[in-house]
Image: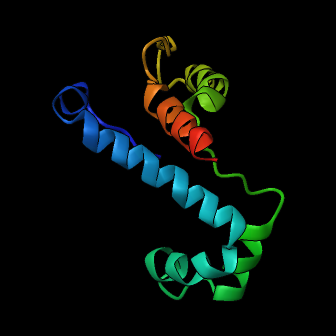
Amino acid sequence: MAAVSKDFLEQHPQQVQALVGGLVRAVEELQKNPDRAAPHIEAALSKGIVDGATIRKSLSSPAVRFVVDPNAITESTKALLAYQVTLGVADKAPSVDGLFDSSFFDKTRSEKSSKK
């Protein structure tokens, strides 16, 4: 997950676009080449707790799905916020209106499509 503040977004839109473009490329790489990504994930996250073979297998699992498109997580975010109310973490679920700005993802996807 990645997030930027409104102030950062307004002051550095090119950097935000570069971040989103990098995330899109990273997810594509994970999907196309999990064996190449596994050693990096093992080094950064497992710290020897989980072996590389397990990480490689998990990256190839149909149960694992990496998502970059903010539109794809809006409904699940609403469900999570509602569940937090059920747990008593919050009195009321906040609105997700304006929480996600898909314009940077949409621009990346559009640029990729035009290069094909």
From the viewer's perspective, tell me whether residue 1 is left or right of residue 36.
left
29 up-or-down from 3: above or below: below
- Residue at the spot x=74%, y=57% of the render? 64
40 up-or-down from 15: above or below: below
Q: Percent x, y for residue 20?
A: 43, 44
From the viewer's perspective, tell me whether residue 17 is left or right of residue 114.
left
Of 78 and 11, the residue lying toward us = 11
Q: Percent x, y for residue 23?
A: 48, 52
Quarter of the figure with residue 62: bottom right
- Residue at the spot x=65%, y=31% of the render? 72
- Residue at the spot x=15%, y=31% of the render? 11
Quarter of the figure with residue 73: top right
Q: Percent x, y for residue 4?
A: 30, 36
From the viewer's perspective, tell me whether residue 11 is left or right of residue 34.
left
Quarter of the figure with residue 3: top left
User: Extreme front residue here?
Assistant: 115
